Image (cartoon, rainbow, N blue to C red):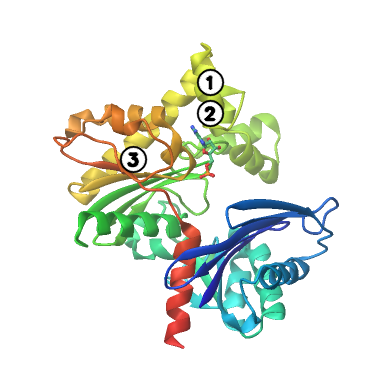
Amino acid sequence: MIILSVNAGSSSLKFTGFEMPSEDILISGVFERIGIDNSFYTIKLNGEKIRKEKSLPDHKVAFQILIDELTNNKIVSSLDEIKGIGHRIVQGGAYFNKTEIATDEVIEKIEELSSLAPLHNPAAIIGIKAAKDVMPNALQTVVFDTAFHQTMKEEEFMYAVPYTWYKEFGIRKYGAHGTSHKYVSQRMNEILGRMDTKLITCHIGNGASICAIENGKCVDTSMGLTPNAGLIMGSRCGDMDATVVTYAMEKTGMSPKEMNDVLNKQSGLLGISGISNDSRDIEDGIKNGNERCLLAQNMYVKRIVEYIAKYYVLLGGCDAIIFTAGVGENSVMTRKQVLDKLAILGIKVDNEANEVRGIEQKITTDDSKIPAYIIPTNEELMIAKDTYSLVLQG
Ligand code: AMP
């Protein structure tokens, strides 16, 4: 059976087609500049990457082209072989704690939550509607980035602001990257051979979050009402004194929208270094003696260490620390700096083992009190697995 995992942005559509239950990837790719000029798509098929320029007026056309590619390349002989389509949804609020079938009622709720994810939720709805139009016989599911974090207790997810804000506006912590934290924690449990574990998962990409997980359930996570909380990220500030915002607005005369833009797009590594939001550029800058890159990296690492230490105490110990996503999987330097700063917990980096990128690997010595692992994330597979189980349930 074929399951598609899709992630619709306002002008893009990423997709991966899996054969299930074998989990083999049959096709993957992305449609870009949908609804804009110069649109194109790229597909990966049989180890080959193909790019095609094509007019993409809307997401429905993109899905139609995807179907043509699937049939022309003989991945499917009939549309009915595609049994399920799983859609990634950024914000599920407090409504959703698991993957759901995309009924009209569910779509309405996702729409309602758009004010918390204005760029993402409306785009995902466009994707769901287009997929339903083009593949009406496939089961459409919605997989929420926030669902995994719904096990947080009130004392973890509340902000110490007037309680009425929570009741009236839903202001609380929802977290993000839940599908990734769930995937790598499940994989870690498979490696450890047990479920009763205390794990700290570090999803460090351009966006970044850390999660404290006990017995497979999220206890706390670093992202908040929106994905701009917790860690310092590529261009997001993460945690800081809330008064910085109102004070800087008074000083600069910025509107809430302008301020939101600065905090999300011009802060983090980019804001401090003044050079880039990309860790590779920061590392190059450090090698070339750039002091602001060094400062940015030191702040970045310090924040990750603070969260791991905090979650170690919260969990009352830790069976493994996991690094994943762009920086977590690839930055030898960031992993080493983080783990070296945690030496007080008896953690010892295996420098040779750590000298790898993008593969599953233990990166601490055998006598390290807590092992640390790189586990490449696979949100697309997690989406496909959840969708597959709902298809099986009929
Ligand atoms: P993601 O959001 O998970 O796709 O991660 C993207 C980020 O990963 C980039 O912006 C870089 O900061 C980081 N990254 C990717 N490759 C490397 C690398 N080889 N070394 C350091 N950082 C990397």
- Residue that label 3 marks: 307
Asked whether disc 2 touches disc 1, contact meaning CB atoms under 8 Å apart, the reply is yes
Residue positioned 53% across, 12% down in the render: 288
Residue positioned 22% across, 62% down in the render: 195
- Measuring from the top left, give residue 199's x and y in whole percent: 26, 51
Q: Amino acid at mark 1?
A: Asp
Q: Amino acid at mark 2?
A: Arg
Q: Amino acid at mark 3?
A: Tyr
Q: Could you give the CA–CA distance between mark 2 and mark 1, rounded to whole angstroms? A: 6 Å
Depth-wise, is mark 3 or mark 2 nearer the camera?
2
- Measuring from the top left, give residue 210's x and y in whole percent: 38, 46
- Residue that label 2 marks: 280
Q: Residue furthest top?
A: 289
- Measuring from the top left, give residue 179's x and y in whole percent: 44, 60
Asked whether disc 3 touches disc 2, contact meaning CB atoms under 8 Å apart, the reply is no
Q: Splitting the image into 4 quarters, where does residue 352 fall?
A: top left
- Residue that label 1 marks: 284
Q: Secondary structure at mark 1?
A: helix
| Along the line of sight, the residue nearer the viewer: 154 or 379 | 379
**Residue 242 visible in this rendered orientation of the protein:** yes
Sequence-earlier tag: 1 or 3:
1
Residue positioned 68% across, 63% down in the render: 123
Confirm if mark 3 falls within 8 A of ligand 1. no
